[in-house]
Amino acid sequence: MWNPEKEKISPAKLRAEQSEALRKLVEKLYTRVPFYREKMNLHNIKPEDINSIDDISKLPFTTKHEMRDVYPYGLLAADRRDIVEIHTSSGTTGKPVVGAYTHNDIDLWAEGMARTLSMAGIDETDTIQNMYGYGMFTGGLGVHYGTRLVGANLLPASSGNSKRQLQLMQDFGSTAISCTPSYCLYLAEYAQEQGIDIRELGLKAGFFGAEPWSENMRLDIQNKLGLKAYDIYGLTEIIGPGVAAECAEQQGLHIFEDLFYPEIINPDTGEVLPDGEKGELVITTLTREGSPILRYRTRDITFIIPEPCRCGRTLRRIHRLFGRNDDMLIIRGVNVFPSQIEEILLRIEGVEPHYQIVVERQGMLDTMEVRVEVNETIFSDEIRRLEFLEKSIRDEIKTGLGVNAAVKLVEPKTIARSEGKAKRVIDNRNITTGA
Amino acid sequence: MIIKQLSIFLENKSGRIHEITEILGRENLNIHALSLADSENFGVLRLIVNDLDKSLDCLKKNGVATSLTSVLAVEVPDKPGGLAAVMKVIDDAGLNIEYMYSIPEKTHDNAIMIMRFDNTEQAVNKLDGKGLRILTQQEVLKL
């Protein structure tokens, strides 16, 4: 266990720490961040109203939309000179969500990931091959910092290039990997094609997150790669990976609630629900400095498991995510909102926003097809012009969202409309995220 | 000289050509020539019909993406080397053909090819006086 003092903290001590942290956080946000001051004034809340962690329900929520509105620095709670790293959420159409990190925030991030890795027994003797993408995406650097802190050998492989990934695994004897669950299945298949038995390479643990996956997929991964597959959770708005993770029991993800305070709410009323009841996960970053967030509505659906875990950690667990209560799609680790596709289409001359997104899981990987209705303006008698149009849309989506989409032109008025409103997304992946 | 062709967008799915031709047949519209070009996901059906306005109207009413395209109907001697001779004239005039297809009917011993150029007006000007016979819409419909 990486930090037994915190991970096995007594509930009373945890509450005391959370209460103190929240009080300080609210005071700081009220003084330093106009966005929060105005919101609190609007709700008639003053910092002195917040005395314990139970008072958190008096505070207003923060939404992704609001975070975008104050792009880029509207949520900054530290001096610019104290910021050492900046990340933004995937998706560059519209405004992205910004996470700004001080030195202490990076340490905090490493702490969350060190706990995560230690849950799977990773220590200095291990070699972690980090196949999450490096860059603005938080996956790569989050695992990177955690691995550094734990002191394991780190292979910062980043995403893609399966041939090299296998070569690294063979040459350096990687004992653990981190990537999206779908990529790891793809890699297993690729290894098989290359005549490599990936089960024999000595992998013992895999850290998988950034996209929805199911219990069946876990069994499949464990079977095909001969490792134990751990579900990890995090999001750029909060810090990146390292917010919650599974221990060896694999019965829910311990949320590091001394750092990230979880609540489950009824998404319609905002009412806080008791442990054990399913609803939307809301997180407050208790100790962040750069861009702390108050009651962030994650849109992820889960419940808090109140029973203590057999591993001995007292930090509560959340159930594997059940899905989302908005229209966000996660395609190979990239967050995609249908509205972003719509914006891209509208930028192309003559294209009307009559479109439909079809998501499939083909073999191991998610595929996205964007169907666009042809109209008289964009219809050309020449095949190459139509093919060029398809390519333009495909390129714009790739550039704007960082995700590959197949683009298909379809006949006018063929996209199913129900009650006058088009059905924008058909998700055929059927991922059962229930246990 | 310039004649109008109907161009129709079709998804690659079974039954679409049947549906389109049925719409036209119901309205007593006759197809003089037809060509179908396809890509991976879609096709473009090109038609020479006897009543353009009526065809356009009824196709649009049925939600079919349709447009009019300017093409030329060029007479080609129906004998060995006939098409090559015509192509030489076009080539010498510096013109590029986007696509072409033939009409089933003939005029005497000549076949008729429908040709689509980058710029139809320019093609007409450049081919003027080069010994090619280009048919009018009326002539094509009378075939």
Image (cartoon, rainbow, N blue to C red):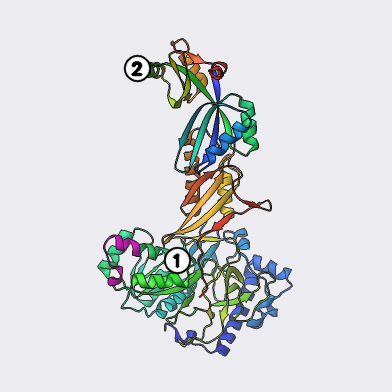
Dot 1 corresponds to which residue?
A: A139
Foreground residue among A30 and A324: A324
Q: Which residues are magenta?
A: A188-201
Categorize mark 1 by other alpha carbons within 10 Å: few (<14), some (14-19), many (20+). many
Query: Magenta-highlighted stretch: main secondary structure?
Result: helix
Task: Kindly identify which chain the residue marked by label 2 belongs to.
Answer: B
**Residue B136: within the magenta?**
no
- For numbered disc 1, what is the local secondary structure? helix
Residue at 41%, 60% in the rendered image: A363
**Figure check: A153 above or below A359:** below
**Rendering coords of residue A382 (x, y %):** 49, 33
Question: Which residue is at 39% across, 61% downward?
Answer: A159
Label 2, on which residue? B81
- Residue located 58% across and 50% down the image: A342
Q: Is residue A341 above or below residue A298?
A: above
Task: Report if residue A237 is visible in the image.
Answer: yes
| Image coords of residue A238 (percent x, y) | 54, 69
In depth, the one of A346 and B125 nearer the eye is B125
Q: Tag 2: residue type? A: Gly
Q: Is residue A336 above or below residue A102?
A: above
Q: Which mark is residue A111?
A: none
Q: Chain of mark 1?
A: A
Kind of residue indicated by mark 1: Gly
Q: Looking at the picture, how far across and down is residue A232, in whole percent?
A: 46, 73
Image mark count: 2
Q: SS at mark 2?
A: loop
Q: Nearer the viewer, residue A295 or B3?
A: B3
